[in-house]
Image (cartoon, rainbow, N blue to C red):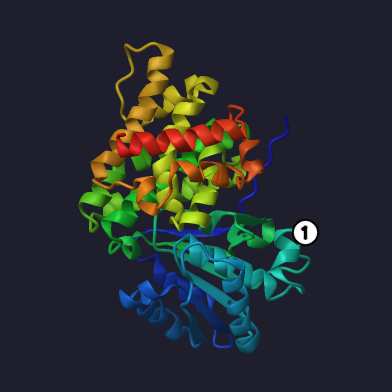
Amino acid sequence: MVTRYHMPVDIHFGIGCLKELSGFLGPSDRVLLVTDPGLEAVGLVDRVREVIQPAGADCRLYDEVVPNPDAALVEKAMERVREYQPTKLVALGGGSSIDTAKVLAALATNAGPLADYQWNCKPFSAPPLPMIAIPTTAGTGSEVTMCAVIVDRNCKKGINGPAMFPAAALVDAELMASLPLYLTATTGMDALSHAVEAYVGLGANPITDAYAREAIRLIGGALWGACANGRDLKARQDMAMGSVLAGIAMDQAGLGLVHSLSSPLCTFFHMAHGEANAVLLKYCMEYNLTARPEKFADIAALLGMRTAHMNPFQAAKAAVDGVDQLFRETGVRVPLASFGMTDGDAELVADNLPGFLLANNPRTVSKAQCIALYKDILVRETGN
């Protein structure tokens, strides 16, 4: 099998690396800063502006990004792009802001509507505007991936290709210190789901395995600490690095059942991406155990589970227990029923699964099995 690895993003990592943003800008630049209202409220937008201003660049703000951005939001944002004609974009936030900025950067230099690229597989012929990603969560890994996910036609549909890679990523864990407990836990579990699915999926290779294993080890050791004390910068840095490594691994190796099942939950029940993946991860791991027992046993060990005297399947099952324990340690619960989902919705969401993700899953899965999984999760999460 031929394996390919391509990672062109200029990654800057470490406390205080936000200040390096000025090195990417000059007096002739017009910068569109893409973010969400919450980050302006907590002062992070002002911190970025303080770095941009000495570079002499003009800067305008687009702060209307919402979780699970859709095609209508992209079109509205493109009106701002056409009017301002930026030379560079800066994305500040989680995956929603970064994915939105990726798409804006590519559409700014390529003619035609988003649907041509998202649904009709039209390639981007011209390079995108330079985009610098500044993540404020340790979750999506979007700052290092060649995919942007936008909701359209009742589906979270990715736009894939080299044009989606940011020019640079500034991963400054200090910007994550104010992230609330709930978001720290759910985005952290999202990052863990990327690493696990990349590690056990059919597209895994030795390079992505190395990234995924280290991501699992870092997240397993740091998530509880980041949740217990958001100002623990060592835990925040480990989570940030784990998220970057997991993002690289999943972008190159692919995802599977967790992300396939989570997509319609975000669309129909307005769950955030991290919330949906946090709920689903242990159940999808349990489903996949028989397909990759040796890798799941590795995951258990990386999470610190004691497996020395277990048989191979017990060791694999310990990975599920380890993930369950890790999430419980955060004190966060995300029951599906609290978002309004019932047994009767299982077929609806199963009808809207992104099938290409299932193709990379290590164990084959049918629509009927997906319906059964949703129903089983609802029962087990409510205790009924």
Q: Amino acid at mark 1?
A: Asn
> x, y (%) of residue 263?
54, 50
Q: Which residue is mark 1?
A: 120
Say above or below: 14 vs 21.
above
Q: Dividing the picture into quarters, in which one does residue 162 lie?
A: bottom right
Q: Residue furthest front?
A: 344
Quarter of the image with the N terminus in it: top right
Residue found farthest to the left: 229
Quadrant position of the C terminus in the picture: top left
Residue 23 to residue 276: above or below: below
In the rendered image, residue 299, in percent from the top left (x then y), is placed at 42, 29
- Identified at 63% across, 55% down, the residue is 158
Residue drawn at x 57%, y 42% is 350
Query: Residue at left 56%, top 69%?
Result: 101
Residue 205 visible in the shown view: no
In the image, residue 330 above or below residue 316? below
Which residue corresponds to the image point at 42% horizontal and 51% vertical from the top-left?
Answer: 274
Q: Residue 39 versus residue 267: which sits nearer the camera?
A: 267
Report x, y in % for residue 146.
62, 55
Dividing the picture into quarters, in which one does residue 383 lie?
A: top left
* Crowding near the residue tagged with mark 1, few <14, some 14–19, many ≥20 C-alpha atoms within 10 Å: few
Q: Give the percent coordinates (x, y) of residue 321.
A: 33, 28
Q: Quadrant of residue 118?
A: bottom right
Query: How many marks on residues?
Result: 1
